[in-house]
Image (cartoon, rainbow, N blue to C red):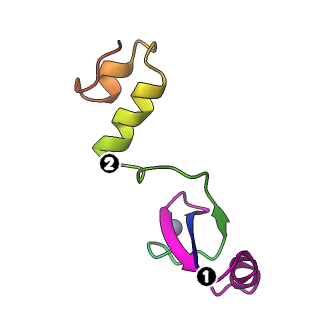
Amino acid sequence: MIVYTLKCENNHGFEEWFTSMAAFDDLTATGKLACPECDSTRIEKAPMAPSVSGSKESQYDRCQSMAEAPPCAQACGGGCMPR
Ligand SMILES: [Zn+2]
């Protein structure tokens, strides 16, 4: 079994387990895989990310990766200051 981090056309991120890479291709090709939030069947693999979009933690991570960016403190509500 392998787990994929997936993303629908509306940018909802979620994870699904598959028996194989071929199983993923088969399910998406036949429209049997749908987003749990909006039921969209236009699903693609997302780059491996440690967190789900929208959470405070992911915003923090994003700011960490662009630590030099001045708007950092605003984006995080002040919780993450540039180093
Ligand atoms: Zn969706």
- Classify 57 as above or below 33: above
Checking the image for residue 8, the label placed there is none
Q: Residue at x 31, y 42 (%)?
A: 57
Question: Which amino acid, mark 1?
Answer: Leu
Checking the image for residue 33, the label placed there is 1
User: Which numbered disc flags the more N-terminal residue, 2 or 1?
Assistant: 1
Q: In which quarter of the image is the N terminus?
A: bottom right
Q: Residue at x 34, y 28 (%)?
A: 75
Q: Which residue is drawn at 30% across and 20% down?
A: 73
**Mark 2 surroundings within 10 Å by alpha-carbon count, few (fewer than 14), some (14 through 19), many (20 or more):** few
Which residue does the numbered mark 2 point to in the structure image? 55
Residue 63 placement (x, y as % from top left): 40, 27
Horizontal side of residue 22 vs 56, given as left or right:
right
Question: Which amino acid, mark 2?
Answer: Ser
Q: In which quarter of the image is the C terminus?
A: top left
Residue 74 placement (x, y as % from top left): 31, 22
Res. 29 image quadrant: bottom right
CA–CA distance in space, label 2 to label 1: 24 Å
Res. 61 image quadrant: top left
| 10 magenta-colored | yes
Region in magenta: 6-34
